[in-house]
Image: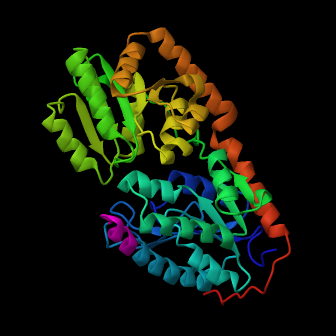
């Protein structure tokens, strides 16, 4: 067992988002800290998370610059290499200042196993927390299976082979860990990204702010990228406005991402800018104000292997807010939402289902209640936290191979 801390010392490395803004990582970190573990996190900086080191809720956060903005396959390779360098340097700092017994790597990318493998030479444990299936993500972004796709497969396999345990966000990811990654089934633990009901909250609707004088509001929250299907959402908006001649519906898109400027321009070229509000990155207060005002929420994720196998946080956040939703018929989306969602086949059908829900308040209320109850009883983070703790209790109670090297604490 660990030599410091009442339970053990855990270092989490995440590149996708800084904490505390990465909701899953922050839920994991705070859960472990509350259970008595010492927790450190390495993550990138951004404008609203620029401190190189700070302590929040007892969790030590170390942030590094990320000067390269990815654009294309080579851009991502440069970004990941830069991040890996800073992550390794900061891991040495954490080792010196605080120590750690387990390194948990949260992908993307699937390169952090190189750091985990290094520390395994000194008796540390390595946990691979698979947030995204990168080969499918690459194919969704670039539409091809080339050298870089094959490299994604190779890096994923090495991540699993290096890991003492892996964490899957759903059963689809668990099958990939076992079948494609070669992990033993008893070493793969499913810990879903359930919403934290202490954070996700309903607030009084603010029609004057969000509806732009219209009768209804349709809400979206998420990353604005190509695989998220915002272009498909604009197809649906155009269908609603032009073909169905509904001028009483406003759409709000909450979030930022690499495709935001393109999607905003696309809306303008279609003459839809008056019907779609783009907030960009927004605070939780603004986010929950917008979604609480919305009568219906949407998840236009483009049908593809990546989205079919992935659990989307927005789906469960809509459910936690008691909002009915419309999405495409994807395996994990249907598993999460069940009867709290309608499932579309194409953008026109998507728009038709949004309008049908807006025109049926009783169905909206029934679906919203189904979603809220499913989150409360099955999907909330409070149901997943014990699974995470069980993983670490098991991992740290088993004999440790090799010898652990602790540097002096300063």
Tell me if residue 247 can be seen.
no
**Based on the displayed image, in which of its 4 quarters is residue 119 positioned?**
bottom right
Q: Position of residue 148 (x, y in %)?
A: 43, 67
Q: Residue at x 64, y 59 (%)?
A: 180
Q: Which residues are magenta?
A: 70-79
- 138 vs 154: above or below: above
Say left or right for 400 vs 48: right
Can residue 77 be found in the magenta stretch? yes
Q: Residue at x 38, y 46 (%)?
A: 283
Q: Nearer the viewer, residue 73 or 225?
A: 73
Which quadrant does the N terminus fall into? bottom right
Q: Position of residue 16 (x, y in %)?
A: 45, 61
**Based on the displayed image, in which of its 4 quarters is residue 350 positioned?**
top left
Q: Position of residue 172 (x, y in %)?
A: 63, 46
Say left or right for 144 vs 242: right
Can residue 346 be found in the magenta stretch? no
**Looking at the magenta stretch, what is its main secondary structure?**
helix
């Amino acid at each position: 067992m660990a030599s410091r801390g009442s339970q053990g010392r855990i270092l989490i490395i995440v590149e996708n988002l800084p904490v505390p803004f990465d909701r899953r990582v922050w839920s994991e970190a705070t859960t472990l800290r509350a259970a008595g573990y010492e927790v450190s996190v390495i993550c990138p900086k951004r404008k609203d998370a620029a401190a190189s080191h700070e302590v929040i809720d007892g969790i030590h956060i170390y942030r590094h610059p990320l000067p390269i903005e990815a654009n294309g396959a080579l851009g991502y390779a440069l970004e990941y290499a830069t991040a890996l360098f800073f992550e390794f340097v900061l891991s040495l700092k954490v080792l010196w200042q605080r120590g750690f017994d387990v390194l948990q790597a949260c992908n993307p990318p699937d390169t952090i196993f190189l750091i985990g493998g290094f520390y395994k030479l000194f008796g540390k444990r390595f946990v691979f927390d698979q947030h995204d299936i990168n080969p499918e993500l690459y194919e969704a972004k670039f539409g091809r299976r080339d050298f870089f796709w094959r490299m994604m497969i190779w890096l994923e396999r090495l991540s699993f082979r290096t890991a003492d345990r892996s964490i899957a966000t759903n059963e689809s990811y668990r099958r990939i860990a076992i079948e494609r990654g070669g992990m033993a089934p008893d070493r793969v633990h499913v810990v879903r990204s359930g919403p934290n009901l202490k954070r996700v909250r309903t607030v009084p609707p603010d029609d004057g702010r969000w509806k732009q004088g219209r009768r209804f509001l349709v809400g979206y929250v998420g990353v604005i990228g190509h695989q998220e299907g915002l272009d498909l959402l604009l197809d649906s908006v155009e269908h609603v406005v032009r073909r169905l001649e509904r001028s009483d519906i406003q759409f709000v898109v909450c979030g930022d991402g690499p495709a935001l400027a393109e999607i905003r321009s696309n809306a303008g070229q279609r003459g839809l800018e008056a019907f779609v509000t783009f907030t960009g990155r927004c605070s939780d207060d603004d986010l929950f104000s917008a979604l609480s005002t919305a009568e219906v929420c949407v998840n236009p994720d483009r049908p593809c292997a990546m989205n079919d196998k992935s659990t989307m946080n927005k789906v469960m956040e809509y459910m936690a807010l008691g909002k009915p939703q419309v999405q495409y018929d994807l395996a994990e989306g249907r598993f999460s939402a069940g009867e709290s969602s309608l499932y579309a086949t194409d953008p026109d059908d998507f728009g038709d289902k949004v309008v049908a829900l807006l025109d049926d308040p009783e169905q909206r209320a029934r679906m919203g209640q189904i979603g809220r109850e499913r989150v409360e009883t099955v999907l909330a983070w409070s149901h997943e936290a014990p699974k995470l703790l069980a993983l670490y209790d098991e991992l740290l109670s088993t004999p440790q191979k090799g010898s652990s090297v602790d540097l002096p604490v300063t």
